[in-house]
Every structure is written in structure tokens, then in C-alpha cells.
Image (cartoon, rainbow, N blue to C red):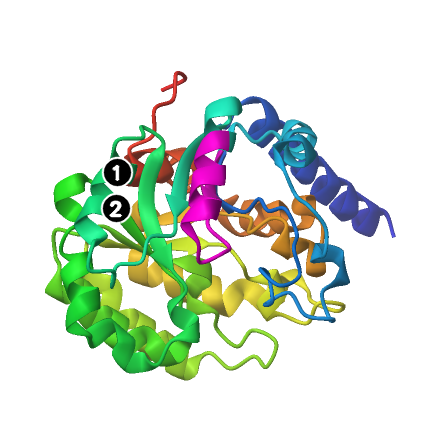
């Protein structure tokens, strides 16, 4: 009994040390979160299984959560395929300094795409583009109009967030290989089947990115791919093992996917998954995953580096 108590005490002590280290010693940038003014017709992907998301989410809602969890800054990512939302995110980033960058929606297939990209590239906090490719057929990434738009990003120093399912990974790999000067980042680990504990095919496809240094991966969006009510920390280990082996500490970055993550847990729950898994990595590796890689990838202007 005494040994059990000591073991439990040691575990609690370790968690307290970990919490202190992150809150007071380690900077953290949340590389993936969303804001929106909820309008049902616009956010039709929010279905009846997601009542918690059917409300507005703005910086004033997120700021106290960040203060409580020791988060320094964030990247606001589009959740609506509209330049109106992109404009709103840029306005929010101007008004709230902790929003260090915006990944907005621009239609890369638009005949006037160069004009639109040049317009947004004027904004210091406009860092990259995302289109919702998970809703497109696999061949969408091979279309000449899309490839033309993609070719315009790197000269403007703009990144591209890849939002896809595992079935799209093979085509995404060839896309990234075709544009070696373009910086890509895979959102939400490409959504592996965590709930079903099926990782083999996804792992094989992800392995292709090992030798593509222009492709990064966000440690984000995992809890909503797990069982929302009954997930455990160990559910995520196979996926985290895979992306760590494929991308290494140099090409991974933490993201919460707030407020979508609230469907399956609190902000602290999501952050603790990353803290627990990466907690035994070296101090320098943790710095890369929790903030340095985000700064480098998105070219962020932060005063504490």
C-alpha cells in the first residue's frame, strides 16, 4: 500500500511540475483555432449532433481560456469558404494582438486568383490559404485551375493548409512533391480513424511525406476523430507515434481546433494530450512543437523570441 501511495504521489508531483513548466517556462502558440458568428445557413457543416457549436465564438471568448492555460498566441484559420470571413478574421487579428496570423479562404480556381492573393498578401497577418479539400473529389487537387492557383502562393510567401481525409493523402503527396518550394501543412493529421482504432492504411500513406521537407503536420483535431464521450489518452498514441516518426519534431506543431474540440473535451483536455505525449521529449524538441515551428512556418512576428 505504501509503495502504491508513493507511486501515485510521484505521478501527481510529475503532473504539477509539467503544468508549472508549461505555464511559466514554455511559450505555446495554438496553430489552429476558429472564430465565427454563427449563421445556420453559412455553417451548414455544423449539424444537429453539434449543438455546442451553434453559437458565436470570438476572441473575447478565447482570451480567458488562453490565459488560464498559458497560451501566448494563435493562428486563426478559416471555417467558411468565403472572403467575407477572411476579411473578418483579418479585422479580428488587427484588434487582438494575440492573434498573430490568419489562414484565410481564397478560391485558388478563380480566374482572378492572382489579384485576390496579391490583395491579401498586403496584410501583415495574412499568412496562408486553406480550401476545404475534404469535401472535394480526390481529383480536385489535380485540376489545372487549382494547380495554377497553388503555383502563385510561394512567390507571395503564403503557406497552404491541407484539410483532407486519409483517402486524399496519396494525391496530396503528389501535390506537395510537385511544388517543392511551397510550404504545406496537413491539418488534424488528415483525420485518421481514431474512433475505430484503424491506423494501418493511414500510416502507410502518411509515411510518404517523410522525405518532403516542405510538408508539416498539425497535432490538432484528434479528439473529434475519437469517441467524443469515452476517449482515453492512449487512443491517440498510435497516431502520434506515426506522425512523430514521419515528420519529427522539426515539422510538427500544436493546435487545438477550438471551438470544434469542445464537442469532445475541454481546451485543457486537448492541450494535455499534447503535453502528456511530448512531455518526455527534449526541451528543444518541445519548444519546436509548441511554438518555434509555428513561428518559422507562418513567419510570425512575436516579441518574445
Give x and y (percent) for residue 16: 69, 33
How crowded pointer 2 is (Cα within 10 Å; few <14, some 14-19, many 20+) is rated as some
Which residues fall within the magenta stretch? 74-91
Name the residue beneath numbered marker 1.
119
Residue drawn at (19%, 54%) of the image: 213
Q: Does 150 appear in magenta?
A: no
Taking the image as shown, residue 122 lies to the left or right of residue 152, namely right
> In which quadrant of the rendered image does the C terminus lie?
top left
Taking the image as shown, residue 118 lies to the left or right of residue 266, namely left
Outermost residue toward the front in this view: 112
Residue drawn at (59%, 52%) of the image: 273
Q: Does 89 appear in magenta?
A: yes
Give x and y (percent) for residue 229: 76, 68
Separation of residues labelled 1 and 2 (CA atoms): 5 Å
Give x and y (percent) for residue 210: 24, 63
Residue 100 visible in rendering: yes
Outermost residue toward the right in this view: 1
Query: Looking at the picture, does residue 59 appear above or below residue 150?
Result: above
Determine contact: label 1, label 2, CB under 8 Å: yes
Residue drawn at (32%, 74%) of the image: 169
Taking the image as shown, residue 250 lies to the left or right of residue 8, namely left
Amino acid at each position: 500500500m505504501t509503495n502504491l501511495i508513493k507511486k501515485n504521489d510521484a505521478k501527481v508531483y510529475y503532473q504539477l511540475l509539467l503544468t508549472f513548466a508549461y505555464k511559466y517556462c514554455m511559450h505555446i502558440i495554438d496553430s489552429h483555432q476558429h472564430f465565427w458568428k454563427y449563421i445556420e445557413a453559412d455553417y451548414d457543416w455544423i449539424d444537429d449532433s453539434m449543438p455546442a457549436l451553434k453559437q458565436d465564438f470570438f476572441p473575447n471568448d478565447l482570451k480567458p481560456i488562453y490565459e488560464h492555460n498559458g497560451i501566448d498566441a494563435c493562428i486563426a484559420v478559416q471555417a467558411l469558404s468565403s472572403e467575407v470571413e477572411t476579411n473578418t478574421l483579418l479585422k479580428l487579428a488587427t484588434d487582438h494582438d494575440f492573434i498573430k496570423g490568419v489562414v484565410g479562404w481564397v478560391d485558388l480556381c478563380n480566374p482572378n486568383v492572382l489579384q485576390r492573393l496579391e490583395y491579401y498578401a498586403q496584410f501583415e497577418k495574412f499568412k496562408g490559404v486553406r480550401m476545404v479539400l475534404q469535401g472535394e473529389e480526390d481529383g480536385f487537387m489535380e485540376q489545372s485551375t487549382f494547380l495554377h492557383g497553388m503555383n502563385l502562393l510561394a512567390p507571395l510567401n503564403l503557406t497552404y493548409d491541407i484539410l483532407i481525409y486519409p483517402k486524399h493523402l496519396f494525391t496530396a503527396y503528389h501535390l506537395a512533391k510537385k511544388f517543392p518550394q511551397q510550404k504545406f501543412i496537413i491539418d488534424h493529421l488528415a483525420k485518421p480513424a481514431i474512433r475505430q482504432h484503424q491506423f494501418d492504411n493511414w500510416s502507410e500513406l502518411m509515411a510518404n511525406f517523410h522525405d518532403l521537407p516542405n510538408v508539416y503536420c498539425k497535432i490538432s483535431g484528434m479528439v473529434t476523430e475519437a469517441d467524443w464521450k469515452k476517449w482515453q489518452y492512449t487512443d491517440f498514441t498510435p497516431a502520434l507515434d506515426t506522425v512523430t516518426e514521419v515528420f519529427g519534431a522539426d515539422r510538427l506543431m500544436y493546435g487545438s481546433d477550438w471551438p470544434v474540440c469542445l464537442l469532445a473535451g475541454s481546451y485543457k483536455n486537448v492541450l494535455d494530450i499534447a503535453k502528456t505525449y511530448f512531455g518526455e521529449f527534449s526541451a528543444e524538441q518541445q519548444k519546436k512543437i509548441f511554438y518555434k515551428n509555428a513561428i518559422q512556418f507562418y513567419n510570425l512576428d512575436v516579441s518574445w523570441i
